[in-house]
Image: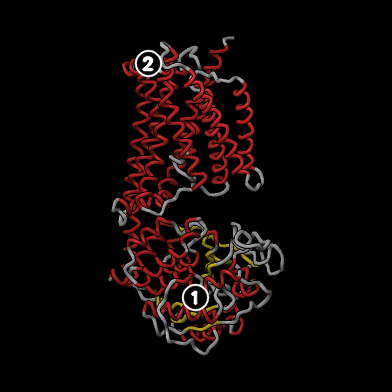
Amino acid sequence: MNIPSFANRAARLICWAVALTCLAFLILLIPGNLDSIMGEPVVLKGSLALGWGAWPQVYAAYILVLRYVVLGLFWLVAGIVYWLGLRRPGAVPALPMLACALTLLLLPLLLNLGGTSINFARPWGNLLEKLLAVWRVGGLVSFLLFVVLFPDGRLAPGWLKASLLAGALLNCAGFLVLIFGPAIANLAFVDFLFYLVLVLLAFASQLRRYFRRSPQQAGSVQVERWQVRGVLASIFLLVVWLCAIYFFGFSPDSPGLALLHTHLGIVIPALLPAAILRSIRRYRLWNIDLGGALLRTPVFGVPVWGLWVMIVSLSLLGGASMLMKSNEITTRANEKIVAARAAAARPVIIDTDMAGDDALAILYLLQHPAVDIRAITVTGTGEAYCGPGVANLLSLLELVGARELPVSCGPERPLAGEHVFPLQWRMDVDSMFSVPLPASVRQPVELPAPELLAETIRRSPQEVTLLALGPLTNLALAVQADPGLVGNIEMIYIMGGAVEVPGNVGPSSAIDNPFAEWNIYIDPHAANLVFRSGAPLTLVPLDATSHAPVTPAFFQRLEGRSATPAARFTYNLLSARRGVMLSGGYYFWDPLAAAILTDQDLAEYRTYQLEVVEDEGPYSGRTQVAPSGPAIRVAVSADRQLFEALFLETLNFETAQ
């Protein structure tokens, strides 16, 4: 058996397998890339540096094109190494070329040049995310092997080769544990640090060999120095950049620095394939004759240059489609506002716990031309205590000139149990996160909140729509005292629960409960009373709100368009919550529920038979499917882009009239 020939054929098969799977992943990542690039903080901040703050989608499309051009460069050079190196019978050295080709194929996935997320429903989305993570680990391993073996497979001192190979295997095992195994504190940091040490050792060995060979030497030694110096410099810059990103985050607040950061994240990775291409073209790296190959176009030009042209063309089409989609969504939102102005206003009652996102939802409904708010009640079992919650609500109404709306608060203890929101949360909400509001001299009405709810529903000549944005204590007391109220209720929209997704109680507190959502958890008995009241219900749980994060992209758009008091307050509140927003832990929970009340097209729905677990323990407050539970319409997903456009247009509605 011809061992070199066999190794060459195996290397070619590996390249084909990796190339096909990488191409499949890149195709699957395109929708997520188009959708998520607008949410990257540095991209949106960079648009401000160029004066494109009002048109961030233009800048995002430009960055998208640059990323795909660099992606095309990676694949172009990988194709050159494969077609003109590995495909040659008995080509030597095959192993360094294999490591190079694999690095160029896998590194774009690791650097997120092709995208960051796969938009598929469970369980396929989770499975593909795991497989993508495995390929990214493969990119780390192949990059390490590339540094070790470049350019001829020899490494000095010799013992370092075995040490690095063993270290790479251990490191790969660590990354796989991170992907598939249990959560282990600080494992990611330790594993990356270990990987960094391995790469630096390999790089140091390359420098040792480079400098120990005399520059005056003629022949192959001097040629090799010419071949490797540009590649080594690009490897060093790439490693420094990756370390800066990993250890420091490097998310600058300055638009100018954000502009620089975004372009460095594209240019620095591009230096590696560019340096390899230069070494091939000028110094015949691996004896690849690029000039001669260009003359033999049928073999080389069609598969390699054709692929690069295809990727660049797709990037241009992707950028254009992103602009068209953004304009289409804005047009749809404007059309919906125009239609709402011509429609009869719906009578609406809001029951709120006056958290920050409640305030945004209330402002949205106050600005919406097809909504006629009749009363707002505060649930004392929610995040705000009654006194500060009512005061903040009255000030909010003063802000937008809605001074005549009746306001009242309900009991501050749940109907059953002793669940409460964390004290620090309540203190922050009571101060409205130190965002200034105008003073109000008004006082709440004398009726307690449950009675105000009941009285407003009974007096309405039309069926009333209710929006519940906190624990359901007030609503439960109202329908319990007068079950006939449900006959004059068109729909109750409830922001609460987690049906097919984990809850947010356990992850955000020290409570051992991974299933419940806070609004339902605080008063599970009240939730069951409302669920079983016979009123038509639409639940907007975490299943839907997880599709509507508060993104830096929206924040930047809002900064460029805050023409009304409602829009300016929304911007100030999101500024106060900037840290949570940038961490990815802040969502449009209540605003999404309010928007769904005004526009059913924002969500997809399923009907579930639901009940709430009332017993104490890790399941308390869980919203679960049960054969004996009442049928409830549940929003299971949301159109984030349409919601953001509609929310922004509505907040600025007064200037659009």
Horizontal side of residue 209 vs 304, given as left or right? right
* Tag 2: amino acid: Asp
327 vs 258, nearest the viewer: 258
Q: Residue 519 location, x and y as percent?
A: 58, 69
342 vs 369, nearest the viewer: 369
* Above or below for 174 versus 576: above
**Earlier along the polypeptide chain: callout 1 or callout 2?**
2
44 vs 497, nearest the viewer: 44
Q: Which residue is mark 1?
A: 466
**In the rendered image, which quarter contains the C terminus?**
bottom left
Q: CA distance from mark 1 to mark 2?
A: 74 Å
Mark 2 surroundings within 10 Å by alpha-carbon count, few (fewer than 14), some (14 through 19), many (20 or more): some
Q: Quadrant of residue 79?
A: top left
* Above or below for 635 versus 193: below
Residue at 51% across, 76% down: 351
Q: Residue 294 location, x and y as percent?
A: 33, 19
- Mark 1 vs mark 2, foreground winner is 2
Q: Which residue is mark 2?
A: 289
Q: Residue 217 location, x and y as percent?
A: 42, 12
Helix, strand or loop at label 1? It is strand
Residue farthest along the top direction in this orientation: 1
Residue farthest along the bottom direction in this orientation: 446
**In the rendered image, which quarter contains the N terminus?**
top right
* Tag 1: amino acid: Leu
Residue at 54% across, 30% down: 144
230 vs 95, nearest the viewer: 230
Helix, strand or loop at label 2? It is loop
Residue 118 visible in image: yes
Horizontal side of residue 641 vs 170, given as left or right? left
Total marks in image: 2
